[in-house]
Amino acid sequence: MDLSELAYYACIILAFVPAIVLHEVSHGYAAYKLGDPTAKRAGRLTLNPAAHVDMFGTIILPIMLMLAHAPVFGYAKPVPYNPSYFEDRRKGDVIVGLAGPAANFVMALIGSAVAWLLVGAAPELMQTSEVFSYFYGLFLPYFVLINLFLMFFNLLPIPPLDGSCIYVYLVPKNRMDIYYNIERYGMPVLLILLFALPYIFPVSPISMYMGATAGNLANFLYPFKIY
């Protein structure tokens, strides 16, 4: 593995870890502000990555996607919370669910803002500093992209992803049992979309969705095209 390839993987990892950690901490912090101490008691309101790592979602899935040269995204261990603490349970579920994607969007905006602040000096600095070249040319673009990938991936309305919380809010209370019965099939459906369909058909619906959403938004926010 040469230096450029090593730098590529290092930049992806350094961008991915804070993106998933802050995503999960935001879920727990939102629940905490709504009166639920569950995440705090479980030690999940910490920025220590070890508290949030999921073997498949945080390590295996991103590596598989990197090796396949597909958009890199994944997930961490879900933050535990108890909606019975919420004054309005359904509204609280939506706030907690959307807190993670909102955190990713804020981080993407911060990464883009840093890139715009440095855009004037970047050409000269990239020629004189190899470290800055990797920071500006690799880390910052991947930091923005990965956060947007995580945001839009988690907004998919498929349980257990965050986007499904919107349906929980919309489903009538007397139909919630039907929703929960459907919910258990969410992960198999997600895995089929991620891995099975791209091998059966010459198109990946998840990649198309990511390109149309995260890719286009990243190109709009960043000083130059990055996707």
Image (tube, rainbow, N blue to C red):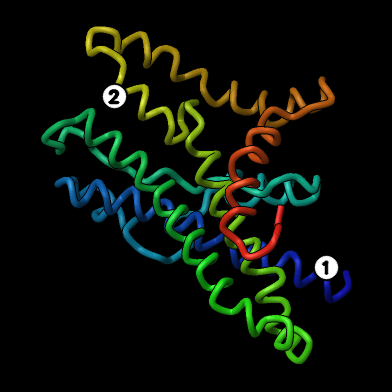
Camera-nearest residue between 99 and 218: 218
Q: Amino acid at mark 2?
A: Tyr
Q: CA distance from mark 1 to mark 2?
A: 45 Å
Describe the element under mark 1 as helix, strand or loop.
Answer: helix
Q: Position of residue 73 (x, y in %)?
A: 61, 47
Camera-nearest residue between 20 and 204: 204
Q: Position of residue 217 (x, y in %)?
A: 58, 48
Describe the element under mark 2 as helix, strand or loop.
Answer: helix
**Label 2 neighbourhood size at 10 Å, few (<14), some (14-19), many (20+)?**
some
Q: Position of residue 91 (x, y in %)?
A: 22, 32
Camera-nearest residue between 20 and 55: 20
- The single residue placed furthest to the left in the displayed view is 87
Q: Going 19% across and 51% down the picture, which residue do you hit?
A: 33
Q: Residue under circle 2?
A: 169
Q: Please give the label number shown on residue 83.
A: none
Q: Going 25% across and 55% down the picture, which residue do you hit?
A: 40
Q: Going 43% across and 66% down the picture, which residue do you hit?
A: 48
Residue 155, above or below 131: above
Residue 182, above or below 6: above
Q: State the image quarter where residue 121 is shown.
A: bottom right
**Label 1 neighbourhood size at 10 Å, few (<14), some (14-19), many (20+)?**
few
Quarter in which the N terminus is drawn: bottom right
- The single residue placed furthest to the right in the displayed view is 2
Which tag is nearer the camera, tag 1 or tag 2? Answer: 2
Camera-nearest residue between 169 and 188: 169
Q: Residue under circle 1?
A: 5
Q: Position of residue 86 (x, y in %)?
A: 15, 37
Q: Amino acid at mark 1?
A: Glu
